[in-house]
Image (cartoon, rainbow, N blue to C red):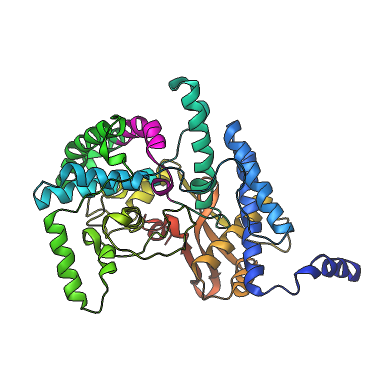
Amino acid sequence: MLCSLLQLSLHVSHLESLPDAELDRLLGVVVDVENLFMCVHKEEDADTKQVYFYLFKLLRKSILQLSRPVVEGPLGNPPFERPSIAKGVTNFVLYKFSQLPPRDWQTMYDLAKMFLHCLNHWKLETPTARKALMTSDDISAYKVNYTRWLCYCHVPAFCDSLPHYDTTVIFGRTLLKSVFQTMRKQLLSKFRAEKDKMPAEKRTLVLTHFPRFLSHLEEEIFEANSPIWDPEFRASPPAHVQQQQQQMLQAAGSSRSASDSDSLSMGLGGRKRQLEDDGGAPGGKRQRHHFDDDLDATIAEVVAVIDEQTRMLGPQAILPEHAPRDEAAKIEEKRNLIEFHVVSNSLTEKVPKQTMLWLISLQNVFSHQLPRMPKEYITRLVFDPKHKTLALIKEGRPIGGICFRMFASQGFTEIVFCAVTSNEQVKGYGTHLM
């Protein structure tokens, strides 16, 4: 026993001088390595498996070298094309619909938000699945973009160790052309299948206005000389939007600088998506001077903000307004898109490897979503055999859960932690868990 402790002490001796924050980061990378290991073994597509394996080795190397993982090689750094999809769609709304009355213009703008939101959460088809539909040159370009999407958009959604970008902010017209028609067909089919669950107003929006919107957008996507894809495209918002900006600026007080007017563009507030036009990673800042100079950040902000349920126009809004908050989660459970499992540690029986991996992932979810809770405390309770955790599993990995302890003799159960990972919130999962 003493020998084992000495060996363990030597094994972690190089970590003694590291601050707690760095140790927590490295533990997070370890969890991501485990998740990618599972992805590699579950994935059947050869191209996708290869990318998962590359990222798995990249994260493992960063642990050994105590460094931060950086995707290198011929993929390049985001953004990959200018203008971005987000800016192109914003240009499209300004170019095509600025002359409409305020209410009609707002409808087009809301449809653009919905389209961008759907694309940011769209799972791209593998190059193998698209090979029969594309020429050899097109499939080669698509394979590069698919690999970029995996590395910068898809995998970082469940691996916090890698920087995450929205698809619409780092990709441009090339990717949009390759996925638009398939995405359009599947979106409209989904909406038609769900039409009986929609309120009349939303049914009209997604079954009447949205197909027309997509038809107009398709023309501009495939039109060789469409001005919306010109990097120098400049257009002012409609007069009523400019008036709203001025009113909001006046209400905010004269101390607000002129550059802040962009943060109120199109009557929007909230979190900024800080991706620089020069290709910098998220987190950079720059001075703003004109409405048109930062349409990328403005529209990315819209995509990032989830409106209140009564105004939401994304996929979640196809449910009736009076439906229970967890109605969408119930439907996903019926379709086996999500599963629920009660897992716990044990000191007397052998714990399955799958259970232990899930417990590690759940500990990471609780730590990430409850930053003020000491990580040691979370770890101790999650792995305490007296506690159990109801795990919400999606695509083979925990995205949320409730850690609890039962006091059977006293007739009650104590809930210790309850959390859902940030990119899966506002979908009714928490309500369904409870």
Judging depth in this view, the residue of 249 and 214 nearest the camera is 249
Can residue 199 be seen? no
Q: Quadrant of residue 224?
A: top left
Q: Is residue 345 above or below residue 80?
A: below
Q: Is residue 6 left or right of residue 113?
A: right
Pick out the residue farthest to the front: 232
Does the segment drawn in magenta span residue 101? Answer: no
Judging depth in this view, the residue of 8 and 173 nearest the camera is 173
Q: Quadrant of residue 210?
A: top left
Range shown magenta: 166-187
Does the segment drawn in magenta span residue 177? Answer: yes
Q: Is residue 316 left or right of residue 364?
A: left
Q: Main secondary structure of the magenta part?
A: helix
Judging depth in this view, the residue of 219 and 48 nearest the camera is 219
Q: Quadrant of the N terminus?
A: bottom right
Q: Position of residue 346 (x, y in %)?
A: 69, 62
Q: Position of residue 25 (x, y in %)?
A: 62, 65
Q: Quadrant of the C terminus?
A: bottom left
Q: Quadrant of residue 191?
A: top left
Q: Is residue 388 above or below residue 167?
A: below
